[in-house]
Image: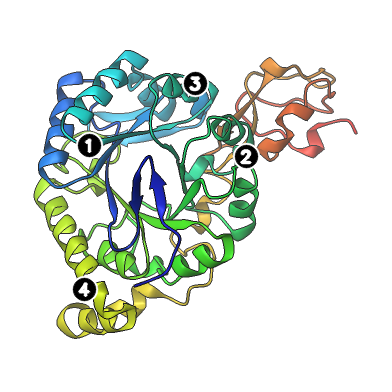
Amino acid sequence: MPNNPPLIIGNQSYNSGHVLIIAELGTGHGGSAAKARELVAAAAESGADCVKFQIVYADEILHPNTGEVPLPGGSIRLYDRFKQLECGIDFYADLKEYAESRGLLFLASPFGIRSARELRSLKPLLLKVASPELNYTGLLTELASYGLPALLSTGVSRLADIEAALEIFPPGRVCLLHCVTSYPAPPQDYNLRILPNLAAIFGCSVGVSDHSLDPVLVPSLAAVMGAAVIEKHFCLSREDPGLDDPIAQGPEDFKRMVRAVRKTERLLKIGRESALDVLRRERWGETVDAVLGDGVKRLAPSETANYERTNRSIHALRDIPAGSTLGSGDIGVLRTEKILRPGLHPSWEPKLPGKKTTRFIPAGEGIGFEDLLH
């Protein structure tokens, strides 16, 4: 069996012989408490160990000028879509209580300081950082101060980005979730031999946040390669209007995934290479090695264009005239997305107030060194 460090949550230990399976419900509830409870119940019946939500406040994530997202009813500003998904913390408190009554672990991703502190008030057992926030140093510092185990997704990141994030957390408190930031992600981009390499390089537990459409392929091979955690989007139907529903798994496919992962846990008793030989022979043939890749950490082909765009950088919250002195209310650490220009790394956030601007910066645009008087 792969000898990667386990993930410890309370008194429970998770490793490739006992994988934590997370149903990522995200914002698929659309703000409806009834729909959210229906999702939790369906996830429990499908074999999930944990349900995960996203505590969304639009202002913590992006600027109103970020751009539009196509939806069945027509295009809408992505910012406005996130505004529609904002729910008070009482909404999540009720879901946490309900999830735990169903025997599930409750998990949520915060996207800024406000949502992080609200999440902490719920007394969760662990935290989750989404891939775009892996470089958000202010948020990571806040979360690290809570002393809880944390899952860090590593989509659209390089080794240096992962190393910088891990330096903020106490040793032994983080599980790295290998991820490909593409929706859907091609299975051959997953390069799952990276899992034991990440565990060896950083000395922490590892897992996978899987955006591929196949319910079984990537999760099964991830378990073989030492994943302690497997996360996959969950929906009631891919026809539902949630932002992630088109790439999520419905209840029957999620059940298939759970059965496949549990079977793989048993298969690992004969050893990793022998287990891989069985999967090659009985199921996937050469596809196994295409998905396993070479184990070198690099941006996957399908996510390369997202680097420095889905990640965080410093943006102007309003139009800033040339010659202005920046205040803390003028800047935000936001996702750039498709049409705006990226700004400085989030670590510069506390250093910018008091700096003078050399030129006009339109609302929403990234703030770079060329915009500042040195």
Residue 191 sits in quarter: bottom left
Q: CA distance from mark 4 to mark 3?
A: 42 Å
Q: Which residue is mark 2?
A: 341
Q: CA distance from mark 1 to mark 4?
A: 25 Å
- N-terminal label among 4 and 3: 3
Q: Which residue is mark 1?
A: 104
Binning the other alpha carbons within 10 Å of mark 4 as few (below 14), some (14 to 19) or many (20 upward) gives many
Quadrant (top left, top right, bottom left, bottom right) of the C terminus: top right
Task: State the SS at label 2.
Answer: loop
- Tell me, yes or no, if residue 313 can be seen here: yes
Residue 169 sits in quarter: top right
Residue 34 sits in quarter: top left
In the foreground, 246 or 216: 216
Binning the other alpha carbons within 10 Å of mark 3 as few (below 14), some (14 to 19) or many (20 upward) gives some
In the foreground, 365 or 122: 122
Q: CA distance from mark 2 to mark 3?
A: 29 Å
Image coords of residue 192 (percent x, y): 40, 68
Q: Which residue is mark 3?
A: 117
Mark in front: 4 vs 3: 4
For the residues labelled 3 and 1, say whether their Cβ atoms are less than 8 Å apart: no
- Tell me, yes or no, if residue 57 can be seen here: no
Mark in front: 2 vs 3: 3
* Residue at screen point 52% across, 55% down: 305
Left or right of 201? Residue 126 is left
Q: Is residue 86 above or below residue 333?
A: above
Left or right of 223? Residue 374 is right
Amino acid type at circle 1 is Leu
- Tell me, for residue 267, which label it has, or none: 4
Q: CA distance from mark 3 to mark 1?
A: 22 Å
* Residue at screen point 72% across, 20% down: 320
